[in-house]
Image: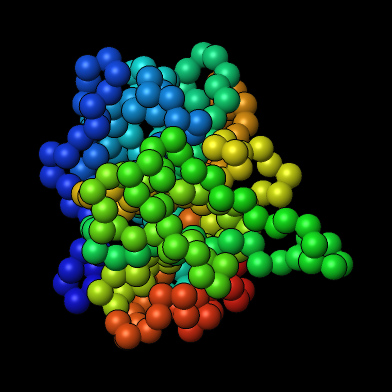
Amino acid sequence: MANGENVLAQLGDLSIPLPDGRKYRLVGGHRLWVAPEDPPVTYAQDDRAVVVTQTQHELTVTGPPEVATGLEKSISVSLHDGGVRLVHRITNRGTSPRMLAPWAITQFPVGGTALLPLNDQDEDDYGLQPNAEVVLWPYAGVADTPFVMKDRLLLIGSDRTSPTKVGTRLDRGWLAYVRNGLVFVKRATHDADGSYADRGASAQCYSSPDFVELETLGAVGSLQPGDTTEHVELWNLYTVSPDVPLAAVPNLLDFDGDHSE
């Protein structure tokens, strides 16, 4: 909340039509999905009653194992460095191993701009080797301009009539959304030795006429029955003057400083 306003999207009955005729209701806010994106697994219904547990410093919400997948998802929230720390957990309650990665998705109202930072470190002594990748989905760039690039940032607007999606490797550990003078930044870690879905794009932004999503992914691994995988995000909310140029926001707020757990 900022000045009594929910900075996350509230989407009511907005839903995704699925290939099997079902609809996945988005609701808004924040959710935990499974990557790589595969409708029978990723879009498993998650609207059943949850269990909420609380300690002195942390609140955890745990859903029941999904009927279709046997996966149990939970999110733990605690205060951290002026913001919040979220631990996303997926536990395999089924009987067979599953190759997957945790996928943390935060939804925002339209009207702002997402910032995805590209790697700004040289890969060799001379600065001659490529050091960043931009990943596009099939519908990006068909009826829109997916992004503007400035100062090693991908600026992804939300004033559009068709959806777009852009990703990159989370080398700098953060991505952000700027709207009406509010800056929401979330941080996560990219494992240089890990294997990632979506051509290595561990940081992603989906922008549609109805909402914007900032997404981070953990590394893909084999989750054995009874095992749990975790993915951590750190969230902070800042205010800036609406007159501050978007590309200046990361330096102004020191996004590339030390914000470790």
Is residue 30 visible in the rendered structure shown here? no
Looking at the picture, tell me which residue is in the foreground, 31 or 161: 161
Residue 134 appears at what percent x and percent y?
Answer: 56, 50
- Judged left or right of residue 173, residue 142 is left
Percent across and percent down for residue 238 are 37, 77
Residue visible at 41% across and 75% down?
Answer: 246
Q: In the picture provided, is 156 more to the left or to the right than 192?
A: left
To which quarter of the image does residue 42 belong?
Answer: top left
Q: In front: 9, or 123?
A: 123
Q: Residue furthest left?
A: 13
> Is residue 73 in sight in this rendering?
yes
Q: Say which quarter of the image contains residue 189.
A: bottom right
Q: Residue at x 34, y 28 (%)?
A: 43
Residue drawn at x 38%, y 20% is: 40
Report whether 80 appears left or right of 196: left
Q: Residue at x 34, y 49 (%)?
A: 144
List x then y, in percent, for residue 4: 16, 72
Determine the residue located farthest toward the front in the rendered image: 143
Query: Looking at the rendering, which quadrant does residue 65 occupy?
Result: top left
In the rendered image, the residue lying farthest to the right is 125
Indicate whether 92 appears above or below 215.
above
Circle count: 0
